[in-house]
């Protein structure tokens, strides 16, 4: 067997180390790297199942001009020619790049250098704008630089962890496991400040169910309260003396916990950042830490978690439109240093367009050439319908990606095949500023190439070859590391010059290295409180509900990778509309039925999940589903393009909405080898099962079975009186090719067993039509533990037999004993039957 390769996970900003062992041409086994300081061997469900996503299904494997395959020369000549023409006719600002936290640092560096240094525009922004730009702005306002002032080890040494707008157990599961461990070993208290009662909130010692966008008021009031108790220094500004926005006893309990625990880390994430007041929220949090001296000491600090694997690397090289490079801005002195380092006389003059403005400029024709790298803005941007229109209007849209047919790639004039995780070779930086190598496991498939190399080839065709003459990723990294030597000249902390001379062999063997050390701001003066005040938002009576969007535990972004994994698809097969029971009743929605969400920007349909975890007046839908995975179920068409005025980060939280029931004539599910994209239905979604797809469908009128089913021998049963129809399609070898179950008013059968028959023969016709075997195995219920395939029923049975802790359930069923991502869900089930509920303070 091949030796394990040390690399890093493809997904979130925790940046877990992985040991990957290649077991076949496109097969790999995954284990946590016990020596990586980010995770010490732990992985969550997404990282654990990375091996299910490394196949070549759906890959873009050669350059495409329109729908025609092209050679690299032809495609790159076209791209460079269009760029050159655009610059000549309309100026540098008519060109833009929209890049991604999925890129490696070397890719980011190359793209940033080409656009800002040699095209002469700063119109390069990144999808990290959607994730943590507000935290960046808050850091810049307070510290004068975008620096995360603490490290993961502070979470282990904290006595109190405040989690603000973070469903950590789902979105940064390995961090959550570290916090749980701190609770076990040192009694660390956990407070969740979040409008939703998430699985994280359920595990907390205290859940403060703050109103949407109520964080600034809460943290200002906490600061004032700490001053009253003699625990905070002087601070005074309008808006500091505000109502905390939560009940008096809740605030008192929170304040007592904060006062009693000087070793306090506040971890904040998208729930804080993705807001029209996201920067102020970040500063309100940092203010509390600064005023109480809880920063740059062991177990203390404000800690912004990034969403993407290399959002931090992008911030460092300067991939945001409002940074020049290497934490430097656009002052004359900074520009002069950068121009000298790059040896260019074409350096951009000032900041470029941030994401939302960038797509507005594409829409109105100011930007005529757009190159999108490794991201899917047609789905992920707010007001995604408008963005799609902008992309369709763009004179030249270039997309470099690993997937051939994303919602964005469909609109591209030129598609360029890029390397995927497992093929790329370079570095990423995680949330605690730790740089790790991401290493190639497989040879590049087809004609796919590294993004930095594609950019360098275009630069060469534009006449800048000397500045982009790197022969490998190590050479790009060395140049970037050397360039960070400019940052200290301007008072910045970023400095990687110690790595500027690594040889190719040293780069290849590079161990994870954290820049700035554990507390990079320790001993540095100059951090300052930033006065922030709560904002009041008016409610439009036509849209009385507040809409919140967010992530699911086992999916990632627009599902182009995690959506390929049958196991990861088990956790949540569909996007759900979560709503409080009384709001649901008021709107006529029922649990398991369909509901349509309307906002001033669009509408989308979801299955309804009635939940006490939602505050009254608020609804939640997930962000992941695209047109390829759901009809009418794309959440970002609902989101307004409102942005934080400082950071430019869009507000994916706290939108205005209303809901209505959707009452289809029929509902159905379809198991099929191929993935149909049904037309003319009220709603559909699909998810991966072994050997094919499971689609859920609902429509009006008659079901067009011929449009849904493949050719083959059909078994069929129907009951017109009950509106029931079941059809199974067999291939020549009698293997099941598809199965469709329709009802007009009754129940549909369970999906698990029949999904497992796909591609198999041997079951009796009656069994197939009934969708269950003659002797059914015990029903597992919804799957909780995807690693071991354990459902709710087995867990509840174990609890009934005396297993009253997560560990005991693990011992009895194996659930939660591998990656541990499902442990909060197990705890939730146990809490319902054997444990008192966590305190909730609203
Ligand atoms: Fe990957 Fe999970 Fe670690 Fe995030 S927490 S880096 S998704 S294994």
Image (tube, helix red, strand yellow):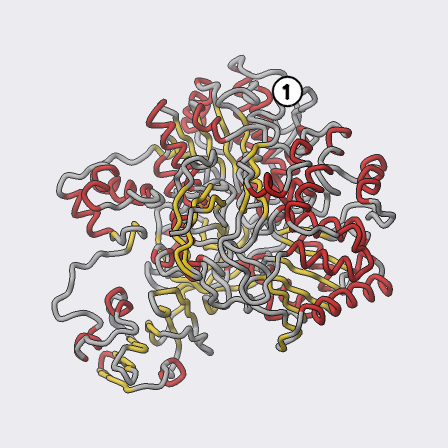
Compared across the picture, whether 301 is left or right of 576 comes to right
**Can you give x and y, in whole percent of width and height, for residue 24 in the image?**
40, 59
Asked whether residue 586 is in view, the answer is no
Please say whether residue 599 is visible from this viewpoint.
Answer: yes
Is 16 situated above or below 103? Answer: above
* Residue wearing tag 1: 235
Residue 273 horizontal/vertical position (percent)? 57, 42
Query: Is 480 above or below relative to 123?
Result: above
Q: Secondary structure at mark 1?
A: loop
Residue drawn at the location 69% of the way across and 66% of the way down:
397
- Percent across and percent down for residue 403 are 54, 64
Ligand 1 contact, mark 1 (Cβ < 8 Å): no
- Ligand 1 sits in quadrant: top left
Most extreme residue toward the top is 230
Give neighbour class at mark 1: few <14, some 14-19, many 20+ (Cα, 10 Å). Answer: some
Q: Is residue 563 above or below residue 329?
A: below
Quadrant of the rendered structure where residue 754 is? bottom left
Q: Where is residue 156, by image quadrant?
A: top left
Query: Front-most of 819 and 697?
Result: 819
- Residue at x 38%, y 72% (from the top left corner): 698
Image location of residue 267, percent across then percent down: 50, 33
Q: Going 84% across and 35% down the picture, which residue do you hit?
A: 333
Q: Please state which of residues 350 and 702 is positioned toward the viewer in this rendering.
A: 350
Quadrant location of the C terminus in the rendered image: top left
């Amino acid at each position: 067997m091949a030796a394990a390769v040390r690399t890093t996970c493809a997904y979130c900003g925790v940046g877990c180390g992985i040991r990957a062992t290649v077991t076949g041409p496109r097969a790999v086994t995954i284990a946590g790297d016990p020596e990586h300081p980010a995770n010490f061997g732990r992985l969550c469900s997404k990282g654990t199942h990375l091996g299910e996503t490394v196949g070549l299904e759906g890959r873009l494997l050669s350059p495409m001009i329109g729908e025609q395959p092209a050679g690299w020369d032809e495609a790159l000549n076209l791209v460079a020619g269009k760029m050159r023409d655009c610059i000549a006719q309309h100026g540098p600002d008519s060109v833009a790049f929209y890049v991604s936290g999925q890129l490696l640092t070397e890719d980011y560096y190359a793209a940033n250098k080409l656009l800002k240094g040699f095209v002469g525009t700063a119109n390069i922004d990144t999808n990290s704008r959607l994730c943590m730009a507000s935290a960046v702005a808050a850091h810049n306002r307070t510290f004068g630089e975008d620096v995360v002032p603490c490290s993961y080890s502070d979470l282990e040494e904290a006595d109190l962890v405040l989690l603000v707008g973070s469903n950590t157990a789902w979105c940064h599961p390995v961090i959550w496991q570290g916090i749980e461990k701190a609770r076990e070993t040192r009694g660390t208290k956990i407070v969740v400040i979040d409008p939703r009662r998430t699985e994280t909130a359920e595990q907390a010692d205290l859940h403060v169910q703050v109103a949407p966008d109520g964080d600034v008021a809460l943290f200002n009031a906490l600061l004032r309260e700490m001053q009253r108790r003699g625990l905070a220094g002087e601070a005074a500004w309008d808006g500091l003396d505000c109502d905390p926005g939560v009940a008096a006893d809740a605030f008192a309990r929170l304040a007592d916990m904060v006062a009693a625990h000087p070793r306090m880390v506040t971890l904040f994430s998208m729930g804080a950042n993705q807001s029209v007041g996201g920067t102020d929220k970040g500063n309100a949090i940092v203010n509390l830490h600064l005023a109480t001296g809880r920063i740059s000491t062991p177990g203390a600090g404000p800690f912004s978690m990034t969403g993407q694997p290399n959002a931090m690397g992008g911030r460092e090289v300067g991939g945001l439109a409002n940074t020049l490079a290497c934490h430097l801005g656009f002052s004359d002195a900074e520009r002069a240093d950068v121009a000298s380092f790059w040896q260019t006389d074409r350096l951009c003059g000032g900041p470029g367009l941030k994401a939302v403005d960038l797509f507005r400029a594409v829409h109105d024709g100011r930007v005529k050439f757009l190159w999108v790298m490794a991201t899917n803005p047609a789905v992920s941007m707010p007001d995604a319908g408008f963005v799609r229109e902008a992309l369709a209007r763009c004179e030249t849209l270039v997309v470099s990606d690993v997937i051939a047919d994303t919602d964005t790639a469909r609109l591209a004039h030129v598609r360029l095949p890029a390397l995927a995780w497992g093929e790329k070779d370079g570095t990423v930086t995680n949330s605690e500023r730790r740089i790790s190598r991401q290493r190639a496991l497989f040879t590049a498939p087809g004609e796919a190439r590294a993004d930095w190399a594609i950019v360098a080839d275009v630069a060469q065709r534009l006449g800048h070859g000397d500045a982009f003459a790197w022969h490998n990723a190590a050479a790009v990294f060395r140049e970037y590391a050397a360039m960070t030597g400019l940052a200290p000249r301007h008072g910045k902390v970023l400095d990687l010059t110690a790595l500027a001379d690594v040889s190719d062999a040293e780069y290849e063997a590079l161990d994870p290295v954290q820049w700035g050390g554990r507390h990079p701001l320790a001993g540095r003066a100059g951090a300052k409180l930033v006065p922030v005040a709560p904002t009041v938002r008016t409610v439009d009576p036509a849209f009385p509900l507040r809409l919140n969007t967010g992530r699911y535990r086992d999916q990632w972004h627009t599902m182009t990778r995690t959506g390929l994994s049958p196991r990861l698809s088990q956790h949540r097969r569909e996007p759900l509309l979560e709503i409080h029971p009384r709001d649901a009743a008021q709107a006529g929605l029922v649990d398991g039925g369909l509901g349509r969400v309307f906002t001033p920007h669009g509408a989308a349909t979801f299955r309804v999940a009635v939940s006490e975890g939602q505050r009254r007046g608020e609804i939640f839908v997930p962000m992941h589903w695209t047109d390829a995975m759901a009809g009418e179920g794309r959440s970002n068409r609902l989101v307004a393009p409102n942005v934080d005025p400082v950071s430019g980060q869009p507000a994916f939280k706290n939108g205005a909405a209303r809901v209505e029931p959707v009452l289809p004539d029929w509902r159905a599910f379809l198991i099929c080898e191929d993935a149909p994209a049904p037309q003319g239905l009220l709603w559909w979604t699909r998810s991966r099962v072994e050997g094919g797809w499971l689609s859920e469908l609902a429509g009006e009128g008659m079901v067009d079975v011929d449009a849904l089913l493949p050719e083959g021998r059909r078994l069929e049963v129907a009951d017109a009186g009950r509106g029931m129809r079941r059809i199974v399609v067999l291939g020549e070898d009698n293997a099941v090719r598809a199965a469709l179950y329709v009802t007009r008013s009754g129940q549909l059968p369970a999906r698990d067993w029949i999904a497992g028959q796909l591609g198999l023969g041997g079951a009796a016709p009656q069994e197939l039509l009934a969708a269950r075997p003659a002797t059914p195995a015990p029903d597992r219920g919804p799957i909780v533990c995807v690693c071991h395939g354990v459902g709710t029923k087995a867990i509840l049975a174990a609890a009934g037999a005396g297993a009253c802790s997560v560990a005991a359930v693990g011992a009895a069923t194996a659930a939660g004993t591998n990656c541990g991502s499902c442990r909060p869900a197990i705890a939730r089930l146990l809490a319902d039957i054997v444990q008192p509920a966590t305190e909730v303070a609203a």
